[in-house]
Amino acid sequence: MLAEITEKINPERRDRTCPRAVKRTRHNSYRVKNPDEPASIRHDGPPTIHIHALTPRAA
């Protein structure tokens, strides 16, 4: 069964984000989408992670 599951690997996904927005306002706290605004944003590549070194504080 596991071999059968691994045969059907998901295809690579596009790099995109979908901001929380609603088409019509109701009883929620999400912002309302503008008519000329796209549903999702496409990016050129995967997100970049930056790790910053912490400076130790004096006690």
Image (spheres, rainbow, N blue to C red):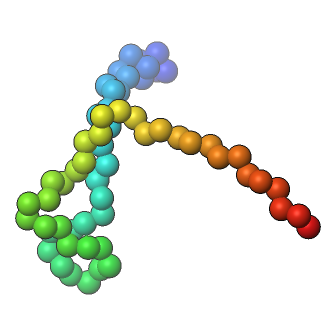
Residue 8: horizontal and vertical position, in percent?
35, 21
- Residue 47 is left or right of residue 22, and the answer is right
Residue occupying image coordinates x 25% and y 42% = 42
- Determine which quarter of the picture holds residue 20: bottom left
The foreground one among 20 and 51 is 51
Quadrant (top left/top right/bottom left/bottom right) for the C terminus = bottom right
Residue 5: horizontal and vertical position, in percent?
42, 23
The foreground one among 23 and 52 is 52
- Residue 52 is left or right of residue 13, and the answer is right
Residue 26: horizontal and vertical position, in percent?
21, 81
Relative height, residue 23 to residue 27 (above, below): above
The foreground one among 28 and 57 is 57
Residue 53: horizontal and vertical position, in percent?
71, 46
- Determine which quarter of the picture holds residue 46: top left
- Residue 17 is left or right of residue 58, and the answer is left
Residue occupying image coordinates x 56% and y 42% = 50
Residue occupying image coordinates x 88% and y 64% = 58
